[in-house]
């Protein structure tokens, strides 16, 4: 070997005191830099509680909710222009489908209107969009084999659930007669 081992592996840190100095600097300098950056970003400006930004109106505006939950049967009061009644019905249906144990549909008097209200509240979320493979209402080709299987088969699937569809469309408060009425309504719209 030519030369000494000490020459091959030299380091600027030669004593324990130098090592402690380097370790302390490795901790202090990053903390100091972060603290100085924080002071630079905030500007250390004093907060004026009489500033217009702290008025009750401005604070309320910053804290207002960004949206509103609309359940089936509620009338939405929105500042956004409506894109059509079907979009509102779909939004209401999705909102009610997302709520487990949805409230029962109020008696609409006319059985056809009640069946339509049940469809809107409990079935439209999937049967309007085709979510999870549900046949879209009005899609004659998708409904034809189901209609051919018979009403009793459709009723049983709707009441007990099938594939991704939960029993009674996820609204356990519906009676079997209500579910059958909703099925009949969807079938009548899909022939």
Image (tube, rainbow, N blue to C red):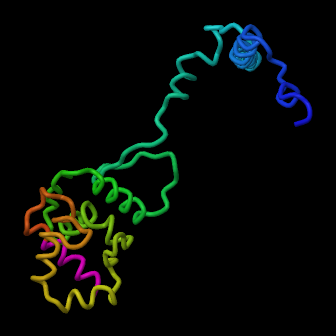
Residue at image location 65% in from the left, 9% down from the top: 47
* Residue 189 horizontal/vertical position (percent): 28, 81
Q: Nearer the viewer, residue 114 or 155?
A: 155
Examine the image and state in which quarter residue 151 appears.
bottom left
Magenta stretch prevailing secondary structure? helix
Q: Nearer the viewer, residue 25 or 121?
A: 25
Relative to 145, is 185 above or below?
Answer: above
Figure disc tally: 0
Examine the image and state in which quarter residue 172 appears.
bottom left
Magenta span includes 186 = yes
Relative to 169, is 141 above or below?
Answer: below
Residue at image location 50% in from the left, 28% down from the top: 63
* Residue 5 horizontal/vertical position (percent): 83, 29
* Residue 37 horizontal/vertical position (percent): 75, 19
Q: Is residue 70 left or right of residue 164?
A: right
Q: Looking at the figure, which quarter contains the N terminus?
A: top right
Q: Nearer the viewer, residue 75 or 136?
A: 136
* Residue 100 horizontal/vertical position (percent): 22, 51
Residue at image location 65% in from the left, 8% down from the top: 48
* View extreme (front): residue: 1
Q: Looking at the figure, which quarter contains the C terminus?
A: bottom left
Examine the image and state in which quarter residue 31 appears.
top right
Q: Is residue 86 left or right of residue 20?
A: left
Relative to 129, is 49 above or below?
Answer: above
Residue at image location 23% in from the left, 82% down from the top: 188
Magenta span includes 115 = no
Relative to 160, is 67 above or below?
Answer: above
Q: Which residues are magenta?
A: 180-191
């Amino acid at each position: 070997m030519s030369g000494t081992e000490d020459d091959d592996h030299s380091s600027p840190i030669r004593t324990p005191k130098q090592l402690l100095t380097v370790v302390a600097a490795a901790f202090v300098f990053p903390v100091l830099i972060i603290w100085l950056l924080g002071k630079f970003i905030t500007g250390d400006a004093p907060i004026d509680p009489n500033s217009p930004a702290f008025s009750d109106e401005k604070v309320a505006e910053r804290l207002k909710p960004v949206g509103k939950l609309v359940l089936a049967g509620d009338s939405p009061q929105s500042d956004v222009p409506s894109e059509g009644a079907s979009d509102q019905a779909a939004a209401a249906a999705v909102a009610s489908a997302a709520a487990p144990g949805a409230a029962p549909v109020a008696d609409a008097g006319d059985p056809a209107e009640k069946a339509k209200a049940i469809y809107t509240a409990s079935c439209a979320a999937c049967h309007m969009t085709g979510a999870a493979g549900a046949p879209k209402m009005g899609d004659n080709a998708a409904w034809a084999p189901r209609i051919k299987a018979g009403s009793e088969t459709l009723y049983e699937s709707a009441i007990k659930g099938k594939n991704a569809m939960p029993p009674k469309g996820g609204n356990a408060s519906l009676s079997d007669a209500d579910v059958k009425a909703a099925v009949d309504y969807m079938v009548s719209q899909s022939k």
